[in-house]
Structure formats: structure tokens, C-alpha cells
Amino acid sequence: MLGLLITDPKPIRLSNVSWHRESYGFDPNEPTSGFGLIGICERVELVRGSFQLESEPEAGTTLHVVLPISEEAADPVVFAS
């Protein structure tokens, strides 16, 4: 399991996003040539959120992202694929 956790002492609202893909999965401890997961982790770190990755060969992959939302934040935006 790969993860990043940054905590903030101030109480704020949090947005939780989880994504799961039933696929081949992979061993997160093995080196890769891509930058996708690194990019996600870096962006989450920039906004002081948390990122957790769960994946195993032949068992799929799940990403969990928790992002802080300030009380002044606008209404949530929904992205459609």
C-alpha cells in the first residue's frame, strides 16, 4: 500500500473520492516508468490532502483521495466522463 497523509490542526470539511478498477492490478512496491500516480500524489500533497493506493496483481486497483475544503469554497463541481 502506498499512501500520503498530511494533517491540519484546524477543523475543516473534507471531500472523499474513491475509484476502483477491476483489472490486472499491480504490485505498488515494484518500480514503474509512468508518472500518473506520482502526479496524483504531488497534487494531493499541494492541497494538504491524503492519498492511498491499494493494488495487488490480479486483484484490481483502488485509489482513495481525501481533500480539505475551506468553508469559503464555492459549491462543488461535478465532472462527467
Image: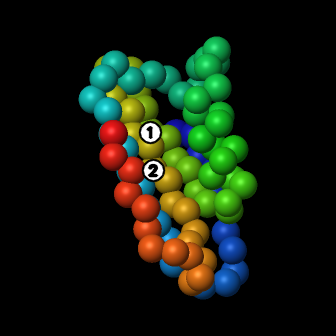
Q: How many marks?
A: 2
Residue type at mark 1 is Glu
Residue in front for this viewpoint, 25 or 69: 69
Residue type at mark 2 is His
Q: Residue furthest left?
A: 22
Where is residue 61 drawn, in percent x and y? 38, 33
Where is residue 53 drawn, in percent x and y? 49, 41
Tell me, for residue 64, which label it has, or none. Answer: 2
Label 1 SS? strand
Instruction: Give the crowd class for mark 1: few <14, some 14-19, many >=20 residues within 10 Å.
Output: some
Q: Which residue is mark 1?
A: 54
Q: Up-down: is 40 above or below 18? A: above
CB contact under 8 Å: marks 2 and 1: yes
Residue in front for this viewpoint, 81 or 1: 81
Where is residue 4 drawn, in percent x and y? 63, 51
Q: Up-down: is 73 above or below 76? A: below
Instruction: Give the crowd class for mark 2: few <14, some 14-19, many >=20 residues within 10 Å.
Output: some
